Each structure stands twice: as C-alpha cells, then as structure tokens.
Image: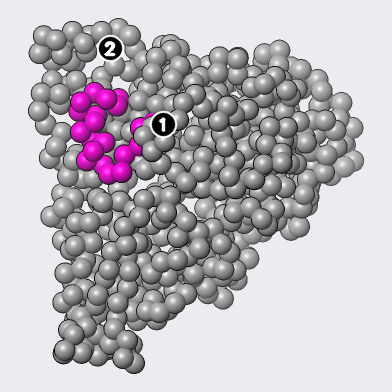
C-alpha cells in the first residue's frame, strides 16, 4: 500500500471504528490492499502517440449532456468517479473515495474522499465538488435526462466535512451504490456560474489522467497525458494509461476512416462494416502484416440496435403498423448479401441473458410481405390506385427516416424496396450527429437507426419505464409505455439477487419485444480491430468487459516494433504474423482455459 493510500486509511480509520452501533457496513473490507491491474502488461512503457478513428463529432463533451459512448470515453479520461471497479471481478474498488459506508437499510451512503485526490490546478477534490456536480445534474434547467433517472432516487447530498459526503436515497434499490459509484465529479470552482448545458472545455480543470490539449472543430480532438496525475503512483494504474498523446479523428462514414487508416494517418480503427472486414483488408499492407487484424472475444456485454419507431404519434402509435415494419425488414438477405453472414439476427433487447437453460422465446420477425400487408389491412389501410400508396382516412402511409450516417443508405434502400412494394412512402432526412441528437432530445422523429451498448448490470428503467417516455433528452426514444413493465421495473428495484433480476428482465424483454418499439436488426459477439503493427499490448488485447476503447488504457507505443515496421515497409518485407482471433479466457489464463476445454 503506497503512502497516499495509507494516509486515506488513517483519516477514515477512526471514523470507521466509531460506527460500531450505526448499523453501517464499511468498504473496502478489512485487509483489502490495492493491487496491480492483472491485465496490464509489465512490459508497458510510457510515451508515444495513439491516433484513433472516431465517429462524428459529439454535440458536447459533457457526458451528462451527451451520453454517447465517445463522449463517455473522453469525459472519463478527464473526470473521475467516486469508485472504481476491479478489472476482472467487477467489484467496487476505491477511487476518488478511498472508503465508503452503506447503511443496513440501503438508504444511506457515505463517502470519504482520498486526501490525495486533486484537480489539475492543484486544488483538492472536496465534498463541495461532489455536491455541486450532483446538484447540476439534477437541476431541471439542465438537459441531463438519462442521468436524472440514474440519480433521481437521491436527495441533494449532505456535506459532513471537507472530504466526507453522505447521500440519502428515497427508497432502497439494488443500483443505488452502482449509481453513486459512477458519479463523475467536476470542479465547482472552475464551472460554477456557467451554463451547464454549454460548458466550454477549453483549458479545463480535471482530475483524471488526460486533459484536452487541442480541438480542431469537426476534424479532431487531442488529449495530453498528465504526468502529475494525483493517482499516477497507485498500484492499480501501473503500466496503464501509457500514451503521451491521444488523437481522436472524426469521420462521417466508416469507409473514409478505413481509407485513412490504410494511408497511415490513423493507427487504430474498429471495424463496424462487415464488407470492409471481409473484402477490403487485402493488399500489401495486410498481406505483409503491416496492418494487423484482430477479432477479440471477451465479456463485453451485448447491446442492441434497430429502427426505433416513435410511438407517440401516427403512424407508429399503432402496433400493427410497427409489426408490419418489422416484417418488411429483410434482415436475412441483408446479412447474407451485404454482411457475409457475420452477424446474428436479434430477437431480444438483452441477448446475453439467454442460455440453453433459459432459451429466448420472443417472436422472431422474419421477412414476410404477405403478413405485413395483412397487418396493415387490419390497421385500416387500403391502397389508393391513383397514388400507389396505402391510405387511411384520406392520409397516405408516409414517414420520415432520420439519418445521421451515410453508411446506412444501402440498408435503407433495401428496406425501401419492400416498403414501396406494399405502398408505403419513406422520406430520408439527413442530419449530422449533433443535429440528430437535438431532434432525438425532443423526440422529433418518426423512425431512426439507434444503437445501444450493453451493460454489466442491466437496469431497464431509463429506457422502458412509462414516465421516461415524456422526459426530454432521455433514453426512451420510442415513447414506450406498459403498465406490466412498469410493475416489473418497480419490483426489481429491491431485488438484490442477480439471478432473480435476470428472470424479471427476461419477462420485461418479452413484453417489450411484443410491442415492437424497434424493428430489431443484428449484432456481433466479437470486436473487430485493425491497427498498424507498432504497439505493444497485453495478450488479451482488450479488457475483460470493454470494447475497443479499452485499448487506450492498456496499449503502448513500442519503439522497437515501430522501427521494425518502418524497415519492413521500406524493404517491402513481411512483419511477423499476429493471431487474428483473441479469446480473453485463453489469453488471460491459458492453463485454466486448456483445462476447461479438456473437461468438455
């Protein structure tokens, strides 16, 4: 245990000892010692640049305002959470808070901040910062919809001392500590008095390992490593966060990013187009292993994607119309002809909850034009022979599809063929990501393509609770409302058994799927990466539970390998091959994986 951690234990030790009759449980448990990250490589070295291919520019770098995955990554590198998680067990660990206490009724949560925790301007991280951040998130004037669901169960925190803060929950809930652990604390002294919805992160005051160093509007964002980071000497961060500079370059579509990778202008690219992976990774750069292909299989939770329909207004306020849309989406043909059967077709919003013991029995919406026609006829639509469009009450069956990515066009063209065949008009509305997000915040759309990542601890409230359908800037895009789902969401709040909660989630999943808020699409169980062979990395390549962004923590610039690459390219020679398929279990603990395989 280093000096900073010992200092924290000394500060809170007397307080913990005095709580014998307070009906609280103290964490971390007695005897806990901070350990090095077992995934991180001991061979890692600090320095170098990583140039990462990102998607379109976000509307904000404030994750509380713009809760997309890219914003979350950038924000989390600057602003740290009260607690961390173990990279292998996912159990809570100290971070900004070095100790925490939970009352036996699960209604009171007290956090003692690490005395070493400091902002980049040298000022300490205090309980005032924690309270200010929470109050900004919960302020009705701020567009923090999804976070309001997460933290709305708590009242404004109580400051017990300069570095001690207590939260009181309005009700017991299994996610209470999970929610508070994820509170990313911002500096009150730096941002107080500014509009939280429009915070300017030029020269930001941060606590995390990286800080913004340069922003080229609509082009790229750069971050610099803070070598004076307060947590830099902690055992758990040893051999992580190695790059001196991170550069995230924006791309409006994936083919452009891929071409930029091939030119050597970015270093790493996560492939989300099957065609690029299957057909385009050819030529000298790939054949000679200058650019490496990686297919990583780990425990990253599976999310879902689909064409979400706005159930708040016609025509998608009618279940039969939504069912017809699902039957007019020829996913089987798209997967076979456009994506080389690389994906599984989704029939669930929680795909990884199902096993041989708990098979998924949700309706599978196969492509079926006749069934779609029958549903639309039942919904009261009839074909107008003069216009060729279905009509109801003199109004044609027409809707707008809100687009944000040109790579969707080929799929929409295929979908549109089926729509036209039955007499439905689809109009495309093209927007950039920021404009798309503004429309989604106000639910100003008919249909759009939405993708959601999975989470280790699934909470259906923000997306499927009825009251969330009317909250601006929320996650209930579809406007889904269902009394039985509301009842199950309420019941699962006080269920502390993951097994029992998963059973409730499967019931919720069946009910949601039956209402068809999305015409579900497809997903993949692996992460596809392309990178120039000039980096070192642990055998697992990625973390246990993370996606491609987790490489930022574990990779490093390998000067020797980079020199070998430069020499190989100059001479037209091959680099040594790297394994394409990387299985986390086999790479992390090969002996255990081999034993398990032998037993089966």
Picture layout, residue 593 above or below residue 132: above
Q: Is mark 2 on a helix, strand or loop?
A: helix
How far, Cα to Cα, is label 1 from label 2? 27 Å
Picture layout, residue 1 above or below residue 375: above
- At x 63%, y 65%, the residue is 491
Check residue 304 for magenta coloring. Answer: no
Q: Which mark is residue 216?
A: 1
Quarter location, residue 347: bottom left
Report x, y in % for residue 431: 35, 55
Picture layout, residue 137 above or below residue 318: above
- At x 44%, y 40%, the residue is 70
- Picture quarter with the C terminus: top left
Check residue 260 for magenta coloring. Answer: yes
**Highlighted magenta segment, given as a residue range:** 248-267
Relative side of 46 to 22, left or right: left
Q: Which mark is residue 253?
A: none
> In this orientation, does residue 327 appear?
no
> In this orientation, does residue 530 appear?
yes
Relative side of 428 to 314, left or right: left
Relative side of 282 to 30, left or right: left
Picture layout, residue 226 above or below residue 163: above
- Picture quarter with the N terminus: top right
Report x, y in % for residue 586: 34, 29
Report x, y in % for residue 503: 51, 61
- At x 55%, y 41%, the residue is 62
- At x 15%, y 49%, the residue is 340
Residue on which the image places disc 2: 562
Q: Is mark 1 on a helix, strand or loop?
A: strand
């Amino acid at each position: 245990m280093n000096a900073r951690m010992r200092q924290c234990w000394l500060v809170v030790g007397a307080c913990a000892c005095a709580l014998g009759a307070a009906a609280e449980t103290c964490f971390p448990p007695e005897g806990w010692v901070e350990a090095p990250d077992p995934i991180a490589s001991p061979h890692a070295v600090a320095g170098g640049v990583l140039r990462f291919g990102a998607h379109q520019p976000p509307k904000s770098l404030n994750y509380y305002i713009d809760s997309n995955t890219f914003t979350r990554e950038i924000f989390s590198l600057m602003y740290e959470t009260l607690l961390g998680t173990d990279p292998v067990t996912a159990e809570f660990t100290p971070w900004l808070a070095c100790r925490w206490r939970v009352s036996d009724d699960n209604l009171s949560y007290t956090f003692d901040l690490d005395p070493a925790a400091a902002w980049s301007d040298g000022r300490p991280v205090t309980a005032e910062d924690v309270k200010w951040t929470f109050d900004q998130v919960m302020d009705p004037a701020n567009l923090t919809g999804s976070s309001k669901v997460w933290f709305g169960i708590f009242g404004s925190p109580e400051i017990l001392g300069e570095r001690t803060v207590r939260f009181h929950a309005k009700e017991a809930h299994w996610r209470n500590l999970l929610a508070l652990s994820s509170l990313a604390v911002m500096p009150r002294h730096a941002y107080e008095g500014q509009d939280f919805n429009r915070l300017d992160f030029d020269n930001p005051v941060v606590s995390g390992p990286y800080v913004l160093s340069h922003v080229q509007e609509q082009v790229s964002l750069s971050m610099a490593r803070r070598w004076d980071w307060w947590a830099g000497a902690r055992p758990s961060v040893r051999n992580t966060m190695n790059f001196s500079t991170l550069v995230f370059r924006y791309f409006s579509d994936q083919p452009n990013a891929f071409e930029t990778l091939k030119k050597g202008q970015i270093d790493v690219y996560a492939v989300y187009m099957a065609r690029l992976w299957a057909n385009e990774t050819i030529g000298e750069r790939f054949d000679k292993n200058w650019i490496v292909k990686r297919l990583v299989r780990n425990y990253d939770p599976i999310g879902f994607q689909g064409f979400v329909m706005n159930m708040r207004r016609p025509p998608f306020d009618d279940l039969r119309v939504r069912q017809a849309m699902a039957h007019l989406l020829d996913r089987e043909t798209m997967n076979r002809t456009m994506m080389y059967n690389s994906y599984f077709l989704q029939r669930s919003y929680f795909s990884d909850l199902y096993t041989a013991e708990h098979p998924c029995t949700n309706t599978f919406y196969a492509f079926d034009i006749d069934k779609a026609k029958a549903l639309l006829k039942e919904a009261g639509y009839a074909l107008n022979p003069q216009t060729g469009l279905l009509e109801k009450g003199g109004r044609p069956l027409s809707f707008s599809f809100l687009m944000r990515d040109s790579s969707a066009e080929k799929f929409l063209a295929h979908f549109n063929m089926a729509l036209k065949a039955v007499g439905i008009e689809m109009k495309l509305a093209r927007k950039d990501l920021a404009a798309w997000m503004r429309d989604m915040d106000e639910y100003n759309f008919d249909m759009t393509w939405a993708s959601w990542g999975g989470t280790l601890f699934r909470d259906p409230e923000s997306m499927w609770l009825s009251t969330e359908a009317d909250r601006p800037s929320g996650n209930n895009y579809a406007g889904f409302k269902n009394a039985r789902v509301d009842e199950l969401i309420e019941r699962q709040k006080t269920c502390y058994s993951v097994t029992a909660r998963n059973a409730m989630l499967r019931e919720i999943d069946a009910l949601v799927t039956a209402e068809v808020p999305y015409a579900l699409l497809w997903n993949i169980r692996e992460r596809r990466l392309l990178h120039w062979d000039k980096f070192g990395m642990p055998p697992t390549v990625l973390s246990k539970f993370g996606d491609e962004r987790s490489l930022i923590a574990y990779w490093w610039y390998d000067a020797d390998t980079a020199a070998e690459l430069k020499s190989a390219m100059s001479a037209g020679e091959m680099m040594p091959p790297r394994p394409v398929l990387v299985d986390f279990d086999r790479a992390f603990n090969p002996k255990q994986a081999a034993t398990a395989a032998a037993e089966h």
